[in-house]
Amino acid sequence: MAWNYIALIIAFPFLVSCSYSRACYDNLSGIYAAEKGEYHKALSDFGRASVIKDVKYVEYNIGTVYRDLGEFSSAEKKFNSIDPGEDRELLYRINFELGSIAFRDSLYEKAAQFFKNAVMIDNSDLKLIQNLELSLLMLNESREKVKSAAAPDKSSISESKGASAGKLLDMMFSGEVPFWFEKSEENTENKKDW
């Protein structure tokens, strides 16, 4: 009888790890299926993987499949339902995805806020910073369109067109130059004139 308890104690970690390993396999299988465009299989795999105690990344993966299927409202709901806790990488990814969805829906102020949150977590992604800048420029442009519809004074609009986005970027990033301006200045300075 004592041997049964000893065998159970020895086998218990393997039994628990097998279900965890299976859930990890299902999660990876779902990611692979989603990359191949097999979205129904991916969702099925993610459903089986949700037995993991900490399902935050599985839920995130389900949100990306909804996004890839064009179900943006479902993806947004899924991303908003995830509690990243102390996981900064997951918080970064969620903010990036929510920013992309908001930008797609022409909600530029909301998109800029999500991208700004992601940049504050990790500012090494140049595409993310460019998305933030583009959101701010589109926000400024949409505000200018509203102003021009109310008061069609075109000279004042053209003078202030890039000013507010530039000021906001200056406040956020301590005067750093937007990437596309920085690259164009480098090209003209380093370009040989011969």
Image: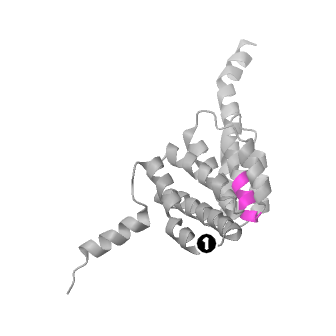
Location of mark 1 (residue): 153
Q: What residue is drawn where x is 66% and y is 41%?
A: 21
Q: Quick check: is 57 in the magenta stretch?
A: no
Q: Quick check: is 66 in the magenta stretch?
A: yes
Q: Looking at the image, which is closer to me, 1 or 38?
A: 38
User: Which residue appears farthest toward the top when viewing the image?
Assistant: 2
* Residue 170 point in image, percent of width and height: 44, 52
Q: Looking at the image, which is closer to me, 124 or 192?
A: 192
Evaluate whether residue 22 shows in this view: no
Q: Looking at the image, which is closer to me, 36 or 106?
A: 106
Quadrant of the drawing holding the N terminus: top right
Q: Amino acid at mark 1?
A: Asp
Quadrant assignment, res 152 = bottom right
User: Which residue appears farthest toward the left when viewing the image?
Assistant: 194
The magenta region covers 63-70
Relative height, residue 116 to residue 83 (above, below): below
* Helix, strand or loop at mark 1: loop
Q: Residues within 10 Å of mark 1 (few under 14, many from 20)?
A: few
